[in-house]
Amino acid sequence: MNKSILTLKNINKRFGSTIALNDVSLEVFPGEIRGLIGENGSGKSTISSIAAGMQKADSGEMLFNGESWNPTSMIDALQHGIGMIVQESGTIPGITVAENIFLAETEQFKNKLGLLNRRAMNKKADEVLSDIGITNVHGSDMMAALNFQSRKLVEIAKVVMKKPQILVIDETSTALSHDGREIMYKLIKQFRDDGKAVLFISHDLDEIMEVCDTLTVLRDGKLIRSFTKEEFEPDAIRTSMIGRELQGDYYRSDFTPSWEDEISIKAEHITVNGHIKDVSIELHKGEILGIGGLSHCGMHSLGKVMFGALKPDEGSVTLNDGTEINSPHRAMKHSVGYVSKDRDVESLNLSASIRDNIAIAGFEQYAVGNFLILNSKEKPYVQEQIDALSIKCSDMNQQVSALSGGNKQKVVFGKWIGRQSEILILDCPTRGVDIGVKQAMYQLMMKLKKEGKSILMISEEMPELMGMSDRIIIMKDGVIMKEFERSAELSDAEIIKYMI
Ligand SMILES: Nc1ncnc2c1ncn2[C@@H]1O[C@H](COP(=O)(O)OP(=O)(O)OP(=O)(O)O)[C@@H](O)[C@H]1O
Ligand SMILES: [Mg+2]
């Protein structure tokens, strides 16, 4: 047998009363792509970030290439061979791409007088990006101007540039669309071919079985089982993830498109310079309308326009009573809710508690006469959302920043679902959420549909679009390419054709 490149022995980690890791031991071998899978809050990010120097274990031992491994920081770990793409945003918005890539290493671009040679730095950044196949992002671009996928790709380039021996990729696929994923898969295979190793975290079972050579399942901080490629079997993996068999429907079970005649919200002739060209859509009462495409196709911007969070250069968004939606305030007042793809920037106040985040959007649901907030009403309201989505937390006063990635997403979802919005604009609502909770979210969406609510679901996940939508609209380069109606005959190949 090969000698392991990374060995973790009996790792323990607690956060207050939460046991994040319970005696986890794991080995990673050269040339191996090891998948890590498990429910939200099972310890995936914790174990991998300990190996990558982001935090320390309470006890246990790590060996890297046979020697004791105790990185003092992520930078230290990266310099010595383990690099990690973190689950949440790992770049700084207010500076350029090149500055992000060479953060704390700009010395090399300074002349004798200490002046920074920006042109040289930008050029080097362009090289680093194009080395891994990214050609539409440049060193001189402002980070904040990039979309979510491009920001993630910059992070990848930044880590891979250091040529680590082990690359840890934490729940990154859902931030990438088709083309971005191709770049990532190519990199991963290169690592394997070079005899290096990858630790790959994803909630997408199909993806992880396709990409990985071995798979380790965590549950409640414990290592449950490792599978070799020959042992990969979806039901067995799912069962070991959730400790029981998944019961009931996952996506909706009918194939009959249905909605009421009444249009609840419509966007007419929307143009956002550089993003969207003359797009019109109508969402009906009781309809789930899916919008799909590659990440830069304009659909995410369209979602923001429909919530009033992005002002179009031309066109308008109106409700059935003629009310124009031109600000988030207006949207919320008229029962329009919005789950953003980029939860850290747009949807959550990370330094506030779960309670405050959920309560603020649901204000009308429990406030008396619109001004008096009763503790006795607010608490049960928040607890209801926590239970409905099984948000894993110590209690409702816990800071959102301390939650695992998927549990943060549940808070965003709970915030808007709970307030009984008539119209919901969901941008990648299940990003980073485990299969058990995804199922609960899909069931909730069906319940809302049956109650006559309208849902606009923007998604990069083909199975989800096909599994839930009454109609699917495909966008490409800012225009609508094609519209499909729900049907059992629809195939993903047929839909993808219009995306790329
Ligand atoms: N800084 C922290 N403070 C308090 N609790 C934390 C902190 N970081 C993680 N936890 C808790 O530790 C547990 C494991 O979290 P971790 O982030 O490793 O989960 P995960 O498997 O990556 O989940 P996800 O799929 O949602 O990303 C969770 O219960 C989480 O709330
Ligand atoms: Mg995580």
Image: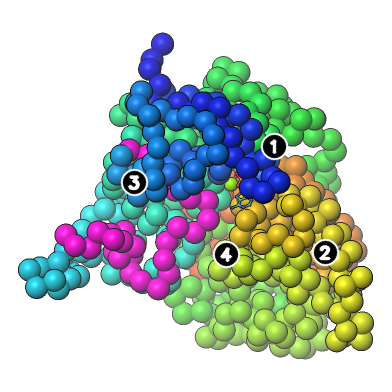
Residue at point 80%, 67% (across, down): 454
In the picture, which quadrant includes the N terminus? top left
Tell me the kind of residue under disc 3: Asp
How packed is label 1: few (under 14 Cα within 10 Å), some, or many (20 or more)?
many
Residue at mark 3: C-beta within 8 A of ligand 1: no
Left or right for 74, reference 131:
right
Q: Label 2 belongs to which residue?
A: 382
- Residue for badge 3: 76
Q: Residue sitting at 59 percent across and 40 percent down?
A: 13
Check contact, mark 3 vs mark 4: CB within 8 A: no
**Which mark is first along the chain, 4 or 1?**
1
The magenta stretch spans residue 280: no
Q: Is mark 3 on a helix, strand or loop?
A: helix
Residue 220: assigned label? 1
Mark sitting earlier along the chain (2/4): 4
> On residue 344, which mark appears?
4
* N-term-proximal mark, 1 vs 3: 3
Which labelled disc corresponds to residue 482?
A: none
Q: How far apart are marks 2 and 4 (CA)?
A: 20 Å
Q: How far apart are marks 3 and 2 (CA)?
A: 41 Å
Query: What's the residue at 9%, 73% (across, down)?
Result: 113
Asked if disc 2 is less than 8 Å from ligand 1, the answer is no
- Mark 2: which amino acid? Val
